[in-house]
Image (tube, helix red, strand yellow):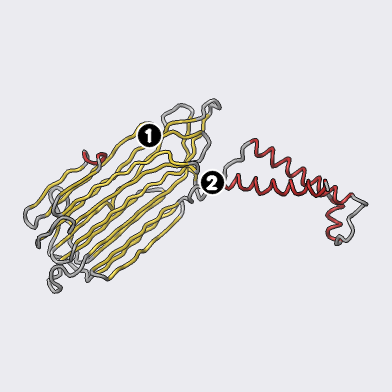
Amino acid sequence: MNKHKSSKVIYWLIPVISLHFSSALALPIQGVSVTTFAEYRGVSSGPATQIAGNPGTVNSTSQAGPGGGGIGTIGVSPQTPVDTFDEAIARGRAALPGTLGSYSHAGGFSPGFGAGAGPVSATTSSQSLTHWVATSTDPSVTTVAIDVLAFFDGTMATGDFAGVGPGDLSARVDAQLSAFTDGGSLYDLALHAALDGSTGLTASAGWAGSVTSGINTFGNVRQATIDYTEFFEDAFVVNIGEVFAWDVMLDTSAFATGPFELWAISDFFNTGGFDLSVNTAGITLIQVSGGSPSPVPEPGMLLLLLIGLLALRWVSRRNCLIDGLPLGLAPTTQSRCLSA
């Protein structure tokens, strides 16, 4: 009876140990992804998603509509004019190492179809997720504050010759930066800005001071340019030796109630990203390369694992030593018992 109880206890310990290690691997896998979707008067392209690891690079494009040049260009000085294509276009990119880019365009000039023939829209989402860990040369240091540098720049523009109401024509950008462990959230920064062809610009407090806007009365062209760089000192605190995830997302969208002399563009394709750093002597912040990290077991778990393996070996030898060998064992099993 004692023999069987000992075996059950040891075999019960093994899944408990495995569960402990798997919980340390609960962070999402590192990598980059881009998802694009475009719709032109009921005809859609996507959603299309491209995924890669770390390091890795992805690009995705979705297009719907007749294409070709539109009625002209959108652009308020000093911004370079942008072609107003007659279609929905969603384009994104993401790279590790590297930055994110997101672009969405909706609308155009379709006199053959007439006004109000159906909505045109495009959405793009670009994301990168990385793992980091802070190490210290001083064993008495258990936590450290992380600094965050965030930078995004791009342009939103709307143009309308046909006349629109609130919500009929819009461009939007959203950025989110977050840090977390498998135990919960450490940091979350969300920024957004939206340009409505009728009511104008709205932006989150974090971006309000980084937006310049203008309007060109010819074609009722509105434009807002965001040039955002901000340094957050001691943004969040991490435990020394604990791997945490850093997630960055950059999304754009554009919507037009129809393709007839309406355009909405959200162009943040060139630059969007971040930098993490520490400013504490003896502390090093390391980006974990490749896929999910393989954490070193805690000392207490190492001892438990060692005890479990020794006990398992003892149970195996004890089974074999009862009356020389247990009856009915196959020759291969007898060999294992003799060598134990």
- Tag 1: residue type? Ala
Q: Which mark is residue 76?
A: none
- Which residue matches tag 2? 293
Residue shown at 38%/48% (left/top)?
Answer: 98
Decide if residue 203 is on the left or right side of residue 78.
right
Note whether 238 is above or below 50 in the view shown: above
- Tag 2: residue type? Pro
**Outermost residue, right side:** 323
Describe the element under mark 2 as helix, strand or loop.
loop
Q: Position of residue 23 (x, y in %)?
A: 56, 46
Q: Position of residue 92 (x, y in %)?
A: 32, 57
Decide if residue 219 is on the left or right side of residue 9.
left
In primary-sequence order, the first of circles 2 and 1 is: 1
Check disc 1: other Cα within 10 Å, few if <14, some if 14-19, many if 20+.
some
Check disc 2: other Cα within 10 Å, few if <14, some if 14-19, many if 20+.
some
Residue shown at 83%/58% (left/top)?
Answer: 333
**Outermost residue, bottom side:** 112
